[in-house]
């Protein structure tokens, strides 16, 4: 049979906590005494259980918050050390890379056109176009992405005779 009321010592023994802790919980308003100084057993048991659940949630939330703060600091350090870049910087860099590829591909007709003059066989034209495309692909195969994204592309220099300027 479950008692209706218990002394603070009986409640402490039942919950395996100290008498002092029971009194603290009464002072904090978690547990309420009757007019005779006793505790309503079922009400006190439910209140104590709810208190422990809330305490666990708070502790769990604090741990989670600390973990998130640590993760944020770690990400900030990685960004400062150059391991990561901002999305806008990546988008700008990749935009420049795509433009470099686009420009190289658009240069193929200009480069192939003079070689096609006077060609009468389709296979010869196909060979010239194939060679020009493969040359462009070779140039794009191992690009220095950092230099391209920063806008520092290698430009081929054409020699136009050996004139001396005065």
Image (spheres, grey):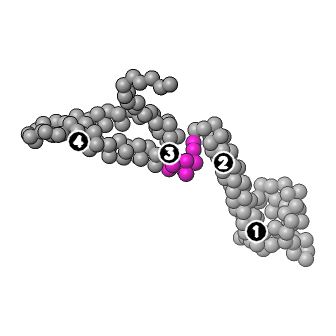
Seen at 29% across and 34% down, the residue is: 135
Residue 149 drawn above or below residue 1: above
Classify mark 3: helix, strand or loop.
Answer: helix
14 or 74: nearer the viewer = 74
Mark 2 and mark 3 residues within 8 Å of each other at the beta carbon: no
Instruction: Give the residues in magenta.
Output: 84-94
Seen at 69% across and 56% down, the residue is: 61
Cα distance between the residues tagged 2 and 1 = 37 Å
- Residue indicated by mark 2: 72
Cα distance between the residues tagged 4 and 3 = 32 Å
| Mark earlier in primary sequence (2, 4) | 2
Mark 4 and mark 3 residues within 8 Å of each other at the beta carbon: no
Residue 95 placement (x, y as % from top left) = 46, 49
Cα distance between the residues tagged 1 and 3 = 60 Å
Cα distance between the residues tagged 2 and 3 = 25 Å
The residue sitting at the bottom extreme is 35
Residue 47 is labelled as: 1
Residue 113 is labelled as: 4
Residue 67 visible in the current orientation: no
């Amino acid at each position: 049979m479950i008692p209706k009321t218990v002394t603070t010592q009986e409640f402490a023994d039942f919950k395996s906590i100290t008498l002092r802790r029971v009194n603290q919980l009464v002072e904090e308003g978690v547990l309420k005494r009757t007019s005779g100084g006793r505790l309503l057993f079922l009400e006190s048991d439910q209140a104590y259980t709810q208190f422990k659940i809330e305490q666990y949630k708070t502790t769990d939330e604090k741990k989670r918050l600390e973990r998130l703060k640590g993760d944020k600091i770690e990400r900030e350090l990685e960004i400062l050390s150059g391991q990561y870049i901002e999305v806008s910087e990546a988008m700008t860099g990749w935009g420049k890379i795509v433009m470099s590829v686009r420009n190289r591909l658009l240069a193929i007709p200009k480069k192939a056109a003079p070689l096609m003059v006077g060609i009468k066989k389709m296979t010869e034209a196909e060979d010239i176009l194939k060679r020009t495309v493969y040359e462009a692909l070779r140039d794009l195969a191992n690009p220095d992405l950092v230099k391209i994204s920063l806008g520092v592309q290698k430009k081929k220099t054409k020699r136009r005779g050996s004139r001396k300027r005065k």
